[in-house]
Amino acid sequence: MEEKTLNISAIQMSADIGNKYNNFKKIKYLVERDVSEDVDVIILPEVWSVGWSCSYFERCAEPAESNETLEFLSGIAKEYNSYVLGGSYIEENNGQYFNTCPAFDRNGELIAKYSKMHLYSSYGADENKYITCGKSPVMIDIDGIKTGLTICYDIRFPEIFRAYRKAGAELLVNMAAWGLHKPIPWETLTRCRAIENQAFMIALTQSGKITDEEWNIGHSRIFNYTGETLAEIKEQNEGAMSAVLNFSPLRKYRSECRIMDDIAESYEVKYYEKVH
C-alpha cells in the first residue's frame, strides 16, 4: 500500500483582544519561528484575529468577499506552499455575522468556507446574540485527504463528526477558543471524536487571558485514529505543534475494525413506562 502522509502544524496563540494587526504580527512570528519549510497544512485557532470577546465581534467583522484577514492567510499559504485552515474570523454578509473558517490551497486560493453551526450561549456566554449559525458542514480535499472542519462548541455534537466520517473524512479539525474551566470536556470530547470515527483529530485552541476572570485553556493536541496523542502544547504556551500523519495505517485499521458496518439502521427508543 502506497503511503500517504501530511505534515501538519497547528498554531496555539494568545490573541490581543480586538487588535487584528497585533495578531497578524504574532501569527507571522510564530509561523516563521516554529513551522518547517516542508509543511503541508498550517492551522490557526478560532477567532485568532479578534480574540474570544463577543462584544468585539461586530466591530471587528470584515466583509465576506474580500478583506485583510483573507489576504493575510492567502499570503501565508503562498509563502509556505501549504494549505491553510484559517481558524476563524468574524464575517459580515448582508447584515448578518458569521464565525467563519476560510480554507486556502497551496497557491493561496480560497477553496472553501465553513461557518460555525453551533453557537456557545451558556453560562453567561452569548455568541448567539451576535452570530448567525452556519447552514451545513464543510469537507475539503487536502492532497487527496478528505478533511472535516469544525469550530469549538461543535465538538459537543457528535452528529457533525459522524456525518463527516460517513462522507469519507480521514482528518477532523476543531479550531477553538476553549475556556480554562472546562478541561475534562475539552480533552475527553476531542479524543472521543478521533476514536469513534477512526480519524486523525486536530484539537487546537487559543491560550491566554480573555479578561481578569476568564482564560483560554491552551492545551492543544493532535490525536491519531485510536486516540493516541501524537503532539501537544501544554498550558498557556504559544507556538506550533507538529506531526506527520500517515494515512496508510489508518486505512488498514479501518479495514480490520469495521465499526461503520455495525451501525444499526435505526435507534428508535422503546420506552416501557412503569405501571403503577
Image (cartoon, helix red, strand yellow):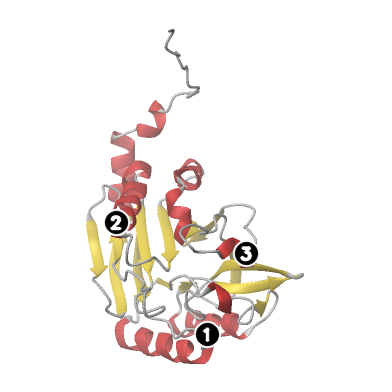
SS label for mark 2: helix
Which residue is most to the right? 94
Q: Is residue 238 visible?
A: yes
Q: Nearer the viewer, mark 3 or mark 1?
A: 3
Query: In this figure, which residue is indicated by the disc labeled 3?
Result: 129
Q: Is residue 147 visible?
A: no
Query: In this figure, which residue is indicated by the disc labeled 2?
Result: 187
Q: Name which residue type carries label 2.
A: Glu
Distance between the alpha carbons at the discs numbered 3 and 1: 18 Å
Distance between the alpha carbons at the discs numbered 2 and 3: 28 Å
Q: Where is residue 113 drawn, in percent x and y? A: 60, 65
Q: Where is residue 238 drawn, in percent x and y? A: 30, 80
> Which residue is painted at 47% across and 91% down in the image?
22
Badge 1: how crowded within 10 Å, few (<14), some, or many (20+)? some
Distance between the alpha carbons at the discs numbered 2 and 1: 28 Å
Q: Mark 3 and mark 1 in contact? Answer it, CB < 8 Å.
A: no
Q: Name which residue type carries label 3.
A: Lys
Query: In this figure, which residue is indicated by the disc labeled 1?
Result: 18
> Which residue is painted at 30% across and 49% down in the image?
225
